[in-house]
Image (tube, helix red, strand yellow):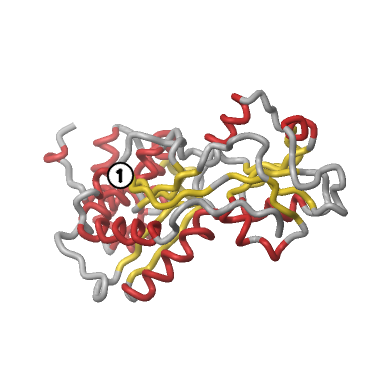
Amino acid sequence: MNLARLDLNLVVALRALLEERNVTRAGQRVGLSQPAMSAALARLRRHFDDDLLARVGGHYELTALGQVLLARTATAYEVMERLFASQAAFDPVSETREFKIVASDYAVAVFGAELARVVHEEAPGIRLRFTQTPTTVVDETATLLSTTDGLLMPHGVISDFPATDLYEDRWVFLVAVADDHPSVGDRLTREDLGRLPWVTYQRTYDAPAVRQLGMLGIEPRVEVSVDNFQLLPMLVERTQRITLIQARLARLLAPLAAVHVVEPPYEAVPLREALWWHPVHTHDAAHIWLRETTARVGRGMVGAPEAHTGF
């Protein structure tokens, strides 16, 4: 494919046509007349050798190829936007722009809140948009990173992309307070981990900790799973369940549930949080500022939190 021979404006027209599924509305969306958008559709049909939009009754539906192109076009459009938004210089005091960061609710609560505070003080025109880590993060890392400014994720889940280390955390267990869970006091045994029901985070984010359990021969008996770390204490409270959670988040959630922290009955692998990005952003001045700022905020979170026995 020779990109020099393509009119990249067709990417804009293609996205509008596939999403609107109507020539007139697509033209209005991108500022083209109905004849001009019809001409763009004709060029796209010749290029792909496919109708893309097929009339069914009084409306248009996407062809099979059109369905495939729908997601790909949105991704390509975002990549082009980020490419042409690249800057040689960046002044955080006067610039106005948005950074999109993919992160779990844990990372936003423990790190993102402090990052947002610093950005508010130092760069008043900068907006941060945090979006939830998708379940496809491991299989589609390159696509995800190409359409965002960064991914907050611990080491051990993805690799082969640039990253800057931020802070460390530890894994601890939560159990209900003694009145609700008399069989477990201030300690758990490995036998308890196989005997008691679990609440787990259902994404792959905590994969290193889960892999370690498997290597120790521990198979959690999962009773409840959830895609939000901050819900874990409420699902442990007043039950016999246990859960594995990050110590920094456990400390933040202290007032919310009648649970207490118990140290793992093994040497748990540490959690080392990092900001990951696509190489296309490496030399962009705005992104360099973002990375330097996140690294500085991370340095303010020195060391993993100390052990503590309860909430």
Furthest residue to the left?
4
Residue 251 occupies quadrant: bottom right
In-image side of 122 versus 230 (left or right): left
Write the residue at 33% across / 45% down.
163
Please state the horizontal and vertical placement of residue 168, each as a whole percent of the image. Answer: 47, 49
| Pointer 1 local density, CA inside 10 Å: few below 14, some 14–19, many at least 20 | many
Left or right: residue 265 compared with residue 283:
right
In which quadrant will I find the N terminus? top left
Kindly identify the residue that appears in the image at 51 percent across and 49 percent down: 169
- Secondary structure, mark 1, is loop
Q: Nearer the viewer, residue 307 or 89?
A: 307
Residue 240 point in image, percent of width and height: 82, 44
Q: Is residue 311 left or right of residue 207?
A: right
Amino acid bearing label 1: His
| Relative height, residue 1 to residue 242 (above, below) | above
Q: Position of residue 59 (x, y in %)?
A: 48, 49
* 29 shown above or below 208: below
The image quadrant that residue 212 belongs to is top right
Camera-nearest residue between 200 and 209: 209
Q: Position of residue 291 (x, y in %)?
A: 30, 56
Label tally: 1
Pick the residue in front: 301 or 133.
Answer: 301
Give the position of the C terminus as an image quadrant: bottom right
Q: Mark 1 sits on what residue?
A: 278
Vertical placement of residue 135 versus 21, above or below: above
Residue at 45% over, 45% down: 272
